[in-house]
């Protein structure tokens, strides 16, 4: 039995005419790192909200189908129980700062206070989470004084510290530089290795190719393609549907048409491209 | 950019170490004694023999005096003049300004009222200078104040300066596109309308996202909450609160009994 199991999920916001998610079927294994790609408005964030329980418990609207995580059905749970098992961090870091806390350390502890973790354990868990994501030196800063990328790390840490069994991340590196992005992918990979199941919406396909186990391409609320990162990310179907692809893939595709790319598979990352172009 | 809206000054002092509820009780006691104790010189005595020593004990004498000079004394002075001239009591005129009379009774009356205000505002100032808002709120939440209530207080204190910064950003952005913010008031008021949209609508979206973010971190969880910081409440604090409570009761009792 899959750890995450979405069956025939169709969902419409109260204010949209058409469904935003259309008949989604998706299974994710425990400890798997799945990445979701798709153009603007494809429904990626909505899918994240659905997994994290906010669709439909927070947004209301019309829903059919079932979402099951760790043997529990979202439709049979309340939001405050569901969030203990499924953690969500999303794109805009500024709005994820609770506003209730004056330092980064307190900000990260906020979730643990809410669920009643004893003080000593709380401190330990906050320290561990901060050193994992590399923000220990920000502990005493005001969350509002940080850069966007730093705030995104704080948002991620604030969720990691709660140790959800499913981690849902909606463009968590959008304001980060390449170093920050690599570190976040590294941390997420590590969490997956330790058994956390991860679902991450991302645009940065080269990083996905290096770190994710599987890629899901979403378009107009439907799953267009799904499979191993290199297969999905180099597929011609993506180009036809206006997805962003890696520059190495497009270069190699061009080269292939002119007979300069000899391999069968197209590359996603620089390394693969270099390998492929070697005489 | 303002980081937050708070008067708190981080120091290590006797006052800082008192439990927030004790400080709240102390503030209340000072105010109620100044207003109800049936002795004319009580507010004056409190100002000299309680407020000033407390500001020294709290190691915030300088900051307190700055607030007093800039805010408390001018406001109380204004109040004093208004009441001294306009209070129609007594016949013993000691000073005249055109048709306005100042009698010795009205001066005494105004002086006491002004000192009461001085004690009240000073007590609050000392409280704010020596108490961290989140410490106060955690303590009150632990004593049964609903978590939502303290969240609203603290987040407002923090988010207001952020909104101010944002409004400033929007104004600069609109001004760079030719928005007039410097001519006559009415013209300006009219031209500020385009700012309302981004500020309010932006805030609504932000409110929704923030609601999701804190919910995702168990804000409405039914577990009993814990607190990162331990806020000590030793026996000394508890006894002090009882003493203050007794003083308040005695003062109010005396006031009723003598009237
Ligand atoms: N709260 C809402 N109420 C009504 N409609 C919404 C709401 N949120 C999103 N939508 C609509 O649902 C559709 C899917 O939006 P969603 O945010 O899930 O897309 P996305 O794939 O995350 O896009 P992006 O890449 O821009 O983040 C869009 O047409 C959007 O306008
Ligand atoms: Mg989105």
Image: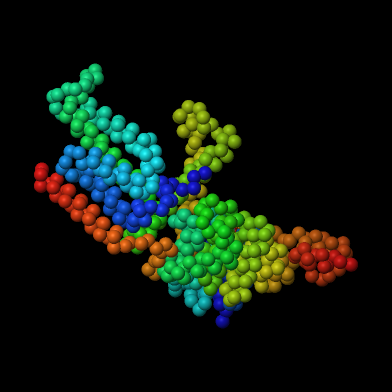
Give me the residue at 49% from left, 72% from top: A85
Task: Determine whether B34 is above or below B111 in the image.
Answer: below
Q: Nearer the viewer, residue A136 or A191?
A: A136
Q: Percent x, y for residue B242?
A: 23, 58
Instruction: Please name whichever residue, A59 or A157, is drawn nearer the observer in this view of the structure.
Output: A157
Give the tally of numbered discs: 0
Q: Quadrant of the C terminus of chain B?
A: top left
Image vertical order of residue B191 relative to residue B3, above or below = above
In the rendering, at what x and y percent does residue A105 appear?
50, 60
Q: In the image, B65: left or right of A49?
A: left
User: Which residue appears at 39% of the width and 69% of the height?
Assistant: B223
Q: Looking at the image, which residue is at 68% across and 58% down?
A: A178
Q: Is residue B74 visible?
A: yes
The residue at the far top in this view is B98
Q: Quadrant of ligand 1?
A: bottom right
Toward which corner of the image does residue B98 lie, by quadrant? Answer: top left
Q: Residue at x 56, y 35 (%)?
A: B175
């Amino acid at each position: 039995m899959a750890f995450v199991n979405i069956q025939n999920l169709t969902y419409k916001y109260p204010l949209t005419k058409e469904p935003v998610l259309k008949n989604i079927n998706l299974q994710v294994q425990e400890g798997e790192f799945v990445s979701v790609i798709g153009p603007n408005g494809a429904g990626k964030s909505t899918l994240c909200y659905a997994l994290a329980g906010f669709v439909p418990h927070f947004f209301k609207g019309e829903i059919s189908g079932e979402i099951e995580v760790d043997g529990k059905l979202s439709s049979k749970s309340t939001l405050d129980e569901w969030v203990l098992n499924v953690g969500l961090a999303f794109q805009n870091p500024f709005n994820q700062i609770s506003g209730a806390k004056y330092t980064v350390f307190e900000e990260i502890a906020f979730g643990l206070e809410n669920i009643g973790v004893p003080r000593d354990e709380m401190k330990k868990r906050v320290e561990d989470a901060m050193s994992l994501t590399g923000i220990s030196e920000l502990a005493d800063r005001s969350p509002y004084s940080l850069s966007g990328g730093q705030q995104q790390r704080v948002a991620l840490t604030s969720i990691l510290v709660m140790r959800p069994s499913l981690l849902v991340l909606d463009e968590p590196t959008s304001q980060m530089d390449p170093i920050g992005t690599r570190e976040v992918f590294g941390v997420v990979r590590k969490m997956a290795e330790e058994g956390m199941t991860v679902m991450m919406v991302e645009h940065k396909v080269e990083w996905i190719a290096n770190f994710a186990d599987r890629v899901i391409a979403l378009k107009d609320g439907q799953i267009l393609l799904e499979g191993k990162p290199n297969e999905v990310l180099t597929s011609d179907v993506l180009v036809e549907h206006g997805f962003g692809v890696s520059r190495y893939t497009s270069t190699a595709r061009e080269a292939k048409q002119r007979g300069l790319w000899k391999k069968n598979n197209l590359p996603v990352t620089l390394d693969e491209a270099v390998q492929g172009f070697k005489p | 950019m303002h980081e937050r809206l708070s008067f708190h000054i981080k120091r290590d002092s006797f006052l800082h170490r008192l439990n927030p509820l004790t400080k709240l009780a102390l503030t209340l006691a000072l105010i109620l004694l100044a207003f109800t104790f049936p002795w004319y010189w009580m507010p004056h005595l409190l100002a000299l023999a309680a407020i000033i020593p407390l500001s020294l004990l709290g190691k915030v004498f300088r900051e307190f005096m700055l607030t007093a000079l800039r805010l408390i004394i001018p406001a109380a002075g204004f109040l004093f003049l208004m009441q001294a001239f306009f209070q129609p009591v007594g016949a013993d005129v000691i000073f005249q300004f055109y048709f306005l009379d100042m009698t010795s009774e009205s001066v005494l009356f105004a002086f006491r009222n002004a000192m009461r205000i001085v004690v009240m505002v000073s007590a609050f100032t000392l409280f704010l200078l020596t108490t961290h808002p989140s410490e106060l709120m955690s303590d009150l939440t632990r004593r049964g104040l609903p978590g939502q209530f303290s969240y609203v207080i603290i987040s407002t204190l923090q988010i207001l300066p952020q909104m101010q910064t944002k409004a400033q950003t929007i104004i600069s952005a609109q001004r760079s596109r030719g928005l007039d913010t410097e001519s006559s008031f009415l013209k300006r008021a009219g031209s500020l309308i385009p700012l309302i949209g981004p500020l309010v609508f932006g805030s609504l979206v932000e409110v929704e996202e923030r609601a999701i973010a804190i919910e995702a971190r168990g804000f409405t969880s039914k577990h009993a909450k814990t607190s990162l910081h331990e806020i000590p409440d030793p026996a000394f604090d508890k006894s002090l609160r009882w003493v203050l409570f007794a003083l308040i009761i005695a003062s109010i009792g005396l006031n009723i009994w003598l009237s």
